Image (cartoon, grey):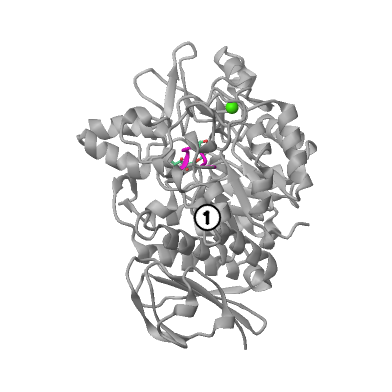
Amino acid sequence: MIDLKKCTVYQIYPKSFCDSNGDGIGDIRGIIGKLDYIQSLGADYIWCTPFFTSPLRDNGYDVEDYRNINPVFGTMEDVEALIAGAEERGMGLMLDMVFNHTSTRHEWFKRALAGEQKYMDYYIFRDGGPDKPPTNWQSKFGGPAWEYVPSLQKWYLHLFDVTQADLNWNNPEVRQELKNIVLFWKSKGVKGFRFDVVNLISKPDVFEDDNIGDGKRFYSDGPRVHEFLKELVADTGIEDMITVGEMSSTSLANCLKYSNPKEKELSMCFNFHHLKVDYKDGNKWELMKPDYRRLRDLFAVWQTEMERKNGWMAVFWCNHDQPRIVSRFGDDKKYWKESAKMLATFIHLLRGTPYIYQGEELGMTNAGYSSIDEYRDVESINYYHILLKKGKTRERALEILRQRSRDNGRSPMQWNSGRYGGFSVTEPWIGLPDNYKWINVAAEDRDEDSILNYYRALVELRKQHKIIQEGRIEFLLLKPEEIFAYKRVLYGQELLVLNNFSGKNVPLCKPIPYSEHSCLISNYNQAENNQGRAIKSLRPYESIAFYGKY
Ligand code: TEU
Ligand code: CA
């Protein structure tokens, strides 16, 4: 059985990682060429977002064939070489299983559309006239969650894009098909799985209008979700592999259940509550400054409850759906380096399994696209038009996208200061910011003080210290609220982690004794600490972790 507590996962978005054949699109051979780099970070697992056959309406989250590789990304041989190459370097590959929905180009859906009853039962079709969808639910990408099929005189459910039809998990045949897909990849030597929006798979028995929301309260953590997960895991024998469920609008109580080893569901879950603290009234498309107090409280509650009830968390700031963290909760200008390192320290010393999303380890920033033509993401483009319709000016709508678009996390990986950041020899499918000239792997690799080398140090610390892997967690809700402080405790040892989430000098309510040998890691030179033997305040975005025995 693997020891999750020691592990760090590196996430790759293949389309934007490295282009090996000069078509402007990242591919699997590109990843293979960078395995030494990933190993140099100390990663134990690589989670690759989907590269299966797909029309790429949603960049691969619209799967047409779960057992074949999209030619744009490579071949099955390439994937086998990737698995083997990772293995040689002591890393395991985790694949992304998109099981809530398929592309409408999937064979099953085509046969459903042709009226084959067996396959209609694979999806969620409901009768009704063309004028009124079965419920008023909204798609996560904007617009109604139902699409009418005139030839069948029925509607089908799609919680995401209209080309992503939701599967009917109540049908045992569907569950069997999905288990077979997991078994197929397991037999290829894949070491773990990420399950896409897996808490949405169980829909209610009765479909009713949601008069207070978009419908999510009826299908998030739905009635049979735990049963379905237990069955999937048991019947595919993956309980000892690393598995992570992506949970959309979930609850702490449900995540405790998904991740408690006794339940034999998943190793851990992603939740997104901490990445909504800058949504105004919960709306992603209304800008607001981050509410740091709420951010800190959320971590405090989730971390302590997860420990108390034996759950396990994936801890992370970034992924392919999120803006870049240094631009969001840090400062990507004046305190770029300090804030990127501070945000990293905070996450990597928590209780849980840390995830690093490609480029995060360099302090990559939001992309800064200035025209709608530069965007590629279906959600961003849909919402741009929705925002205009709601009366926002073009400038305002673009400002909102500049901060909120998923494309911020999808600009090409910045490898060097050469043309296109070394990502490709031709113009990439999506643009990259000018800062690739100094924010890139080559430059940071040779700079001892770089964000990249700081991430390497953090990953190594987790491997070295049991207290980081297993220590109990205790949040210190100090004043002011920009100070995020916690302790990890393990048999007479203590690790104290202090982080300043602001660009100001912040006095601590009580001085912390300091000695040089107790400092495990910091983003400032502590020797020049002006306060002598005690820390009385933290500098802008300062982060420091002390280790001691008592
Ligand atoms: O994302 C699920 C999801 O709901 C979001 O993170 C979504 O991008 C956000 O709510 C929009 O505001 C997963 C994948 O990570 C994402 O890339 C896919 O588009 C989505 O599922 C559908 O498969
Ligand atoms: Ca390519």
Instruction: Give the quarter of the figure containing the N terminus.
Output: bottom right
**Residue 287 within the magenta-colored segment of the rendering:** no
Identify which residue is drawn at 68% across, 37% down: 32
Viewer-side residue, 355 vs 362: 362
Image coordinates of residue 62 in percent, x first then y, are 54, 28
Above-or-below relation of 403 to 500: above
Image coordinates of residue 106 in percent, x first then y, are 60, 21
Q: Which residue is mark 1?
A: 316
Say which amino acid is labelled 1: Phe
Query: Counting other residues with Cα less than 10 Å from the Cα at mark 1, is it few (<14), some (14-19), or many (20 or more)?
Result: many
Q: Is residue 466 visible?
A: yes
Q: Is residue 299 left or right of residue 488?
A: left
**Residue 411 within the magenta-colored segment of the rendering:** yes
Viewer-side residue, 275 vs 349: 349
What is the magenta segment's predominant secondary structure?
Answer: loop
Identify which residue is drawn at 40% across, 57% down: 336
Per the rendered image, the range of residues in magenta is: 409-415
Q: Is residue 190 visible?
A: no
Identify which residue is drawn at 75% across, 41% down: 85
Above-or-below relation of 172 to 272: above
Instruction: Give the quarter of the figure containing the C terminus.
Output: bottom right
Where on the picture, by quarter, is residue 511?
bottom left
Above-or-below relation of 338 to 401: below
